[in-house]
Image: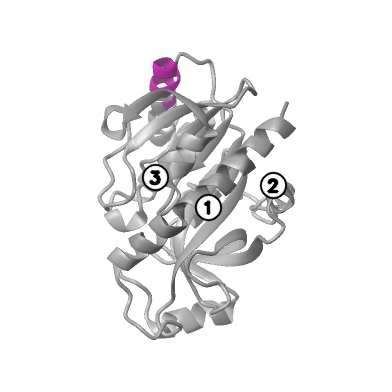
């Protein structure tokens, strides 16, 4: 077995053992602006600091959490694994560290994954504060989390079934294509124009690599972005990380309630 999968299995055993459960069912990766959702899902029955779990590290960026929580989803009898310790590719730990969270979730028993992020928009109609379902992505990092001849099909990577479920809960939800850049610098105006020309509505520094790894692990997944800023050149003002965090905080209550309702709907359909 590959070392990275051994580490994921060890992490999963630590998380399941700490929570006293045989398995988790749904995993959530909470990006900028989405942190309040965990408290709305149900009772948090166990929690671990990231650095106490094999392969995880404390986040290096303010606003990106740092704990791994087990949440009982209402009265469904199902458990969510809330991964508040995302590793970004720009941290320099390598692509396996980026994929470690979703691989751990799969090893812990999760069959469904919800990826969230805070992102920029290439389109003025996706204004700051807008949640947008990810329908597809462009991986512009020039790397893959897969090793060797692992020819994973990504045709239907972002589940049409889960997107339809989300839109039944909130019919106003739009869809868009997400482009992951390596970061940590924000994109230039030319790069934003390029991304839009290639078909991207959203730009950010996460999600695509995790999605690929999750599909390779056999998980069904959905992605949902919170637009925290207009991309460079679309916005008339320079980009600022503090303003990105502020936009996420302002939208937090509404999008967190939305996400909790979506996860409850997923859990109910799996009964």
- In the rendered structure, the answer to whether residue 164 lies left or right of residue 62 reads right
Q: Bounds of the magenta span? A: 12-19
- In the rendered structure, the answer to whether residue 96 lies left or right of residue 193 reads left
- Name the image quarter holding the C terminus: top right
Residue 230 locus on image (x, y percent)? 45, 75
Q: Residues within 10 Å of mark 3 (few under 14, many from 20)?
A: many
Asked which secondary structure carries label 1, the reply is helix
Classified by dominant secondary structure, the portion drawn in magenta counts as: helix
- In the rendered structure, the answer to whether residue 254 lies left or right of residue 68 reads right
Would you place residue 22 above or below residue 110 in this image?
above
Dot label at residue 91:
none
**Do labels 1 and 3 touch, CB within 8 Å?**
no
- Name the image quarter holding the N terminus: top left
Would you place residue 125 above or below residue 178 in this image?
below
Frontmost residue, 68 versus 102: 68
N-term mark: 1 or 3? 3
Asked which secondary structure carries label 3, the reply is helix
Q: Residues within 10 Å of mark 1 (few under 14, many from 20)?
A: some
Residue 142 lies in the magenta stretch: no
The residue at which mark 1 appears reads as 254
The alpha-carbon separation of the residues under discs 2 and 3 comes to: 26 Å
Frontmost residue, 126 versus 176: 126
Residue 134 locus on image (x, y percent)? 60, 59
Would you place residue 264 above or below residue 21 in this image?
below
The residue at which mark 3 appears reads as 96
**What residue lies at 57% left-to-right and 41% top-to-bottom?**
260
Name the mark nearer the viewer: 2 or 3: 2
**What residue lies at 36% left-to-right and 41% top-to-bottom?**
85
**What residue lies at 49% left-to-right and 64% top-to-bottom?**
129
N-term mark: 2 or 3? 3
């Amino acid at each position: 077995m590959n070392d990275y999968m051994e580490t994921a299995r060890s992490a999963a055993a630590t998380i399941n053992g700490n929570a006293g459960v045989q398995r988790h069912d749904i995993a959530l990766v909470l990006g900028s602006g989405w942190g309040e959702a965990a408290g709305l899902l149900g009772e948090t029955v166990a929690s671990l600091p990231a650095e106490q779990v094999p392969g995880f590290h404390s986040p290096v960026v303010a606003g990106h959490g740092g704990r791994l929580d087990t949440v009982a989803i209402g009265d469904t009898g199902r458990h969510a694994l809330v991964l508040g310790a995302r590793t970004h590719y720009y941290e320099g730990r390598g692509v396996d560290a980026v994929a470690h969270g979703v691989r751990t979730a799969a090893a812990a028993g999760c069959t469904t994954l919800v990826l969230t992020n805070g992102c920029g928009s290439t389109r003025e109609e996706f204004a700051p504060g807008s949640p947008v379902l990810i329908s597809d992505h462009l991986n512009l990092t020039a790397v893959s989390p897969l090793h060797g001849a692992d020819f994973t099909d990504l045709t239907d990577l972002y589940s049409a079934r889960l997107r339809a479920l989300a839109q039944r809960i909130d019919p106003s939800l739009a869809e868009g294509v997400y482009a992951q850049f390596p970061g940590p610098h924000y994109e230039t105006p030319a790069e934003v124009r390029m991304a839009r020309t290639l078909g991207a509505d959203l730009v950010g520094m996460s999600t695509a690599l995790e999605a690929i790894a999750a599909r390779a692990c056999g998980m069904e997944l959905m992605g949902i972005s919170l637009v925290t800023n207009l991309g460079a050149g679309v916005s008339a003002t320079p980009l600022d990380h503090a303003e990105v965090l502020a936009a996420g905080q302002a939208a937090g209550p509404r999008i967190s309630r939305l996400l909790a309702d979506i996860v409850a709907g997923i859990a109910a359909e799996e009964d």
